[in-house]
Amino acid sequence: MATIHPTALVDPKAQIDPSVTIGPYSVVGPDVCIGRGTRVGAHCVIEGQTRIGQDNQIFQFNSIGAIPQDKKYAGERSELHIGDGNTIREFCTINLGVQGAGGVTRIGSHNWIMAYCHIAHDCHVDDHTTLANNTTLGGHVHLGDWVTVGGLTGIHQFVKIGAHAMVGFASAVSQDVPPFMLVDGNPLAVRGTNSVGLRRRDFSSERLKAVKQMHRLLYREGKTLEDARRAIAELSVDLPQAAGDVELMNNFLAGAARGIAR
């Protein structure tokens, strides 16, 4: 049997792995599924069509799987999927999706989500991200792998932040942030590349050189976005180790519907 505190209210229909721990006064609804090794702290509410994977640590006072803060929501089925190995600190709110807009909020694996974060409906958070205290994601936000967001930052609905980007403390993000970039402020400004983070992830000197050149082409030479994209695409000829990084950047720029932070 799972280790469930006597004061916790766990619906008998919930699918709880025998290795799960649930703390005092927590509430788990009938449509919740929690995987092996996950620990849920005290005073948490986990509800809705919520699937939580393995080895997550959910600290006390979290609201996970509540209905979305969207006036269009009319009680239809929607879902929240959380992967494996995530840390979710105190007082976070993570909402279900909204039908007609995808219907699923997704959080990947190995994310570090600090206290008082809000992840709204239909957000997609990939893997290995870090969200510092009081990060707020509006609906439909997409964070790529290894994104870092500083505390007290607000991210506007439908914004995409590319893989390996870093957003500084107390920023207002209303346009898409390309991969590898370092941004901050209100209004938001691009300060350079996330070179420290990339070195920590063992980017080779050739890949770092390509990232630096992509930044120069986007922000230092006065090129239009289309001209910059064409020039970026050519980098992989001379820097073959960075071909994947170049492809990542060009695919991101092609789908930047809100325009990029420039």
Image: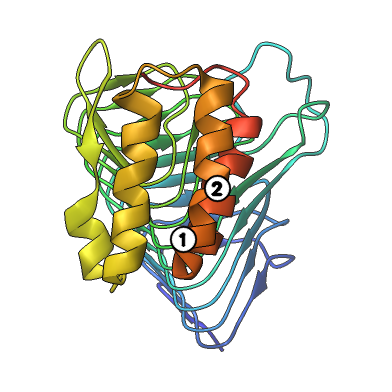
Q: Give the label on residue 217, or none.
A: none
Residue 124 visible, this orientation: no
Residue that badge 2 annotates: 234
Identified at 63% across, 17% down, the residue is 70
From the viewer's perspective, is residue 210 above or below residue 83?
above
The residues tagged by marks 1 and 2 sit, at their Cα atoms, a distance apart of 8 Å
Q: Looking at the picture, how far across and down is residue 128, in whole percent? A: 40, 62
From the viewer's perspective, is residue 12 above or below residue 256?
below
Residue that badge 1 annotates: 238
Q: Looking at the picture, how far across and down is residue 73, in whole percent? A: 73, 20
Extreme front residue here?
Answer: 238
Neighbor class of circle 1 (other Cα within 10 Å; few <14, some 14-19, many 20+) is few
Identified at 22% across, 36% down, the residue is 192
Identified at 23% across, 44% down, the residue is 132
Q: Between residues 193 and 47, which one lies in front from this camera angle? A: 193
Q: Quadrant of the N terminus?
A: bottom right
Amino acid tagged 2: Glu
Q: Quadrant of the C terminus?
A: top left
Residue 210 visible, this orientation: yes
- Are circles 1 and 2 on residues that touch, CB within 8 Å? yes
Q: Looking at the picture, how far across and down is residue 47, in whole percent? A: 60, 48
Q: Quadrant of residue 140?
A: top right
Q: Quadrant of residue 96?
A: top right
- In this picture the colour scheme is rainbow
Q: Is residue 185 left or right of residue 243?
A: left
Identified at 22% across, 12% down, the residue is 186
Name the element at disc 2: loop
Neighbor class of circle 2 (other Cα within 10 Å; few <14, some 14-19, many 20+) is few
Q: Looking at the picture, how far across and down is residue 42, in whole percent? A: 32, 59
